[in-house]
Image (cartoon, rainbow, N blue to C red):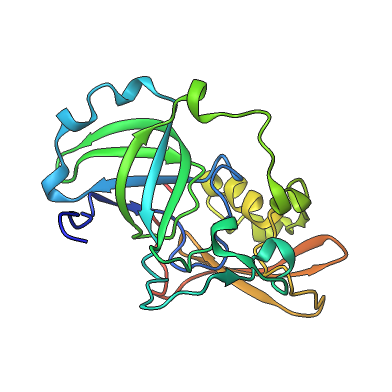
Amino acid sequence: MNGIPAMKIIARIRSGFPEKFGIPRQSGLVEGLRAEILFEPEYRSPEALRGLEGFSHIWLVWLFSEAVREDWSPTVRPPRLGGNQRVGVFATRSPFRPNPIGLSAVRLSGIRQDERLGPVLEVEGADLMDGTPILDIKPYLPFADSIPQAVGGFAEQKRDMQLEVECPAELLEGIPPEYRAALLGVLAQDPRPSYHVDPSRIYGMTFVGLEIKFRVAGGVLTVLQVERCNGAGKAAKGG
């Protein structure tokens, strides 16, 4: 349609997830998960952030950069329903949409000025892969954005289900202390696709430059191995 301006990437996120596997399915599920918002050179103006320090949370409008497609499907298989039942794409937060745009509410834990990068937003609870393009940032308004009586549809079915996580002490020692709580929180959310139920299967995920291998059986996730990645992932500063 004529007259609609092209979207501009204003920033990118720096997080501990170089791959999609392991990222929480929604923002805010792991509150201690830290990340940083780094602005593109054109938008590194402290003036653009004036007043933002007064808000505890912000909305991130972002691009599903790994899910851009020319075509689209009116139905998808959401993980919340086990991946075997189709519902309308507009009844889900699937990345496979006509316009691959994501929306996340995150905690704004700080704003700092970097000599090289300009203003940097420090956030918690983000569900974005490292390098994800940010299209816009808006303040979260509790009086308008929070609706306590809202109904969550089929997404409510497994809202409070978490795994018990067992990580041997010697493996826990291999995780930097500042990342331990966040990683255990991510694992408790069960990174596996909902339709994976094989208790003998070993999974691997990358987080802040570490390769984590685990197995899930009977509601218990057991960490089997923690190793430093060989250049495949990087430890992201701040998350």
In the image, what residue occupies the spot 57% across and 51% down?
26
Query: Closest to the observer: 163 or 72?
Result: 72
Q: Residue furthest front?
A: 1
Q: To which quarter of the image does residue 141 belong?
A: top left
- On screen, residue 194 versus residue 46, left or right, reads right
Residue 192 place in picture, x, y as percent? 67, 68
Q: Is residue 162 visible?
A: no
- On screen, residue 112 versus residue 168, left or right, reads left
Residue 41 higher or lower than 202, as above or below: above
- On screen, residue 189 versus residue 228, left or right, reads right
Residue 201 place in picture, x, y as percent? 75, 80
In the image, what residue occupies the spot 53% across and 46% down?
27
Q: Is residue 99 visible?
A: yes
Query: Closest to the observer: 59 or 74?
Result: 74
In the rendered picture of this protein, how many numbered marks are placed on residues? 0
In the image, what residue occupies the spot 48% across and 64% down?
95
Residue 104 place in picture, x, y as percent? 47, 45
In the image, what residue occupies the spot 80% across and 80% down?
200
Residue 238 place in picture, x, y as percent? 40, 45
Q: To which quarter of the image does residue 174 belong?
A: bottom right
Residue 89 higher or lower than 51, as above or below: below
Q: Residue furthest right?
A: 218
- On screen, residue 86 versus residue 229, left or right, reads right
Query: Closest to the observer: 87 or 191?
Result: 87
Q: Quadrant of the N terminus?
A: bottom left
Residue 235 higher or lower than 70, as above or below: above
